[in-house]
Image: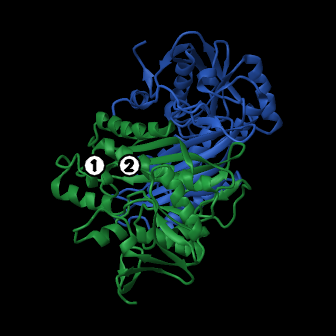
Chain colours: A green, B blue
Amino acid sequence: MKDEFAFIRSIQPDRHHQPTVVAGIGDDAALYDGEDGWHEIATVDTLAEDIHFSRKTMTPYQTGHRALAVNISDIAAMGGRPVFYLVSVSVPKAGTWREEELQEMYRGMSDLAAKYEMDLIGGDTNATYDKLVVSVTVIGRVEKGVKLLRTNARPGDTVFVTGPVGSSAAGLQLLLDEGLEAEKENKRAQAHQTPMPQVQAGRIIAGSGLRTALNDISDGLASEAHEIANASGVAMELEWALIPHELDGEERQKEWALFGGEDFQLIGCAGENDTEKLRQLFEAEGLKLYPIGTVTEGTGVWLTDGKERTRLDKGGYNHFT
Amino acid sequence: MKDEFAFIRSIQPDRHHQPTVVAGIGDDAALYDGEDGWHEIATVDTLAEDIHFSRKTMTPYQTGHRALAVNISDIAAMGGRPVFYLVSVSVPKAGTWREEELQEMYRGMSDLAAKYEMDLIGGDTNATYDKLVVSVTVIGRVEKGVKLLRTNARPGDTVFVTGPVGSSAAGLQLLLDEGLEAEKENKRAQAHQTPMPQVQAGRIIAGSGLRTALNDISDGLASEAHEIANASGVAMELEWALIPHELDGEERQKEWALFGGEDFQLIGCAGENDTEKLRQLFEAEGLKLYPIGTVTEGTGVWLTDGKERTRLDKGGYNHFT
């Protein structure tokens, strides 16, 4: 597919039949009216073997963890609490996955689910041709009125992230270099294999009542910054010195931090004073919030490093600026 | 996988964290508390190319129709109204599906969705290795208190179906024999390519307030009868002469009608008088209900054809009885 975003626009419905839809396609997850006082949130993500994960770098347990974490992260980006999950797994006919390995994958999900008191409520088990495909649906809840949408950024806002970025990409490289077994206790390897979604951070922001645009960083900081900037019709100025990472001394630190993705930290935009209020709320719960730039009028995402100002594309630098 | 049902039991949680779960794994779809006065219903099903469908027998449009219909049918079997759907599609890197074909697939879904005023509210687009995999999640609603569960059958009940069975299997054979283009207007081919879920039938049963066990016939009449019988701890006696089908003169009529599946009719059990009440409610809306047997004490599903009484296995006859 040439352009996933153009394709998604082409299949996006131009109106909703149901008046209960609050936000459909085009954000981290869908919002619709739920129980009294609550919106329901629904999201689905699929991991395919040798596309999104490899048995060379992740155990079945870790694959399960990640398949669920990806979706919980989308709920976190809406400020919600994950509640239920459904799993559809397509198992290769070739027999490359043993039943014990599949059970390990489900255990990776249920251990993570237990942290949030989530329940597995459904799914199906199917065959596929030659690679495992696992599709997870997560249903969550957020208080009515909370809409941490991508369209919420305004010129003058501060851009923030909830934690270090790039560790997952660095961990993947390490695992590719050194293999699955060598790096059990390594923090970077863990960032790739068992990333933790930022539900608590999302809940603090939801509870604050402050206007905030929020995204989870699944496709890379630059890409998610673009999504917010495009959806809100604004530009962003990011400062390299402010972006938190644990990659000092690494030649590829900028590439990993800006374009690596899959850390499942959150990126957001809120008014300057509101961001400071959020930082204090985070601190009170032992969490950190890192201002990394500002929202301006215009288009595009820009990075200042010392004196150099560069336009960031979604997936890399654009040197024609 | 040796035994899908044993595997599902092995990954099934032994308790729920959330008190709002009404029915989790083990029925057509999950039930949980929703908006005031309503339960939410969630279900997910995945179709994999060359496992569940083939481009030789279904167009992309029909594949989309079927991928959504499978899930709507699960909602129908809970007596619910389908409301939302999310689509996760994994597209072969090999480029075997053109973007226009993918759009056709989504159009097949949205045309069917429009009949029920359902909205596409989310999903994702991914790559996969070499075969298309499409996973659809459907969220529906049913009035609180309605639980058309598999466990509801009681000895003395009548077993019924909502329409003819076996046409989809017969249609598949026709398409395999004669190819995709030859059979556009053929009713059997349509039964395979664009099966219609029985939402209206499920809604009548839900509205009746009568105790009913209900399943959709996705894996074959015998298989679904077994699921109800096992879940309810009862046996079933079916009568071949009563089973509705449109396969007269066909050598394989019994095989198709009993084990073919994918017709998306409903099979249910209700008290004898209640079944007659349901039949009248159906008739009032221009639908039919066909009694096909009775529920008894014991185990197993049995078929009487003339004087011969045979034990039916899930996927075929058992000749050792």
Q: Position of residue A261 (x, y in %)?
A: 37, 63
User: What residue type is disc 2 on?
Assistant: Arg
CA gap, disc 2 to disc 1? Answer: 9 Å
Identify which residue is drawn at 26% across, 53% down: A189
- Residue A141 sits above or below residue A170 on the image: above
Which chain's residue wears label 1?
A
Give neighbour class at mark 1: few <14, some 14-19, many 20+ (Cα, 10 Å): many
- The answer to whether marks 2 and 1 sit on the same chain is yes
- Of pointers 2 and 1, the one earlier in the residue sequence: 1
Q: Is residue B180 visible?
A: yes
Q: Is residue A64 left or right of residue A235?
A: left
Question: Which residue extends farthest right?
Answer: B284
User: What residue type is disc 1 on?
Assistant: Met
Choose top left, top right, bottom left or bottom right for residue B81.
top right
- Label 1 sits on residue: A58
**Quarter of the image containing the C terminus of chain B?**
top left
- Residue A142 sits above or below residue B142 on the image: below
Q: Is residue B185 visible?
A: no
- Residue B101 sits above or below residue B82 on the image: below
